[in-house]
Image (cartoon, rainbow, N blue to C red):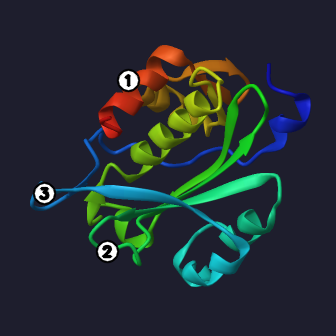
Amino acid sequence: MPKKSEMKNTPLDVEIDKLTNSIENSLTGEVFNTEIVRLSEKDKHQIPKTDWLFDWHSEVSDLKKEVFKLTTTNNPTIIQGLLSIEDKEDHIFMHLIESAKFNRGKSKVYLGVPANLVAFACKISFDRGYEGYVAFDAKTALKKHYEQMLGATHFRGQRMYIQTNAAAKLISQYFQT
C-alpha cells in the first residue's frame, strides 16, 4: 500500500511509443541491444543539464533514489533515456522517466526507450523479491495510455501500479534470459 507521503511525487509524463524488443530506429526499424547501468554521484557529468527536462543531478544526489541510464551496447557513451526509482521495501516506486531529447517528439531517433526503462524497473522489483510490483504517479491524461500499453492498474488519484503478470510480460518483452 503506498504511503501518503508518496502522493506528492511528480507524475510521469512520458508516452510509451512502442513495445519493442529493445530500442528500435524509428526510420529503419533496426533493433539495437541496450544496457542499463546505475549512475553514481561521480557520473553526473554524463548528464548535461541543458539536454534534459528534469533535474537529474538532483535525482542522482538523492540518497533514497537510484538513477539508471539506458544506452545501446554499441555506444555506451550516449544516454538514450534515464530512470529514477526508489526501493519502498515491498515495491519499486518510479519517480521519473525521461527519453533523451533526440528520442522525443515526432522526429525521435529511437522507439521503445520509456517502455524499456519501465520493464527494467519491473525486473528490479522481481530481483528484490517484490513480485514485479512497481508504482508511479501518472498525469491524468496518460492513465488510460499506461493501462493499455503497460498493463498498469489505477489505484487512486494519480497513483498507478504494475502488478506481477503485467510486469512479467514487460520483462519477457525486453529481457530475454
For residue 162, which quarter of the picture? Answer: top right
Residue 55 left/right relative to 68: right
Percent x, y for residue 21?
Answer: 25, 42
N-term-proximal mark, 2 vs 3: 3
**Callout 2 amino acid:** Asn
For residue 94, which quarter of the picture? Answer: top right
Q: Residue at x 40, y 32 (%)?
A: 171
Residue 95 left/right relative to 51: right
Q: Residue at x 73, y 63 (%)?
A: 59
- Local packing at callout 1 (Cα closer than 10 Å; few below 14, some 14-19, many 20+) is some
N-term-proximal mark, 1 vs 3: 3
For label 2, the residue is 75
Distance from disc 2 to disc 1, alpha carbons, whole Å, reads 27 Å
Query: Which element is circle 3 on?
Result: loop
- The C terminus, quarter of image: top left
**Number of callouts in the render?**
3
- Name of the residue lying farthest toward the top: 165
Callout 2 touching callout 1 (CB < 8 Å): no
For label 3, the residue is 30
Distance from disc 1 to disc 3, alpha carbons, whole Å, reads 22 Å
Q: Which mark is residue 169?
A: 1
**Callout 3 amino acid:** Glu
Percent x, y for residue 144?
Answer: 48, 26
Percent x, y for residue 53?
Answer: 59, 69
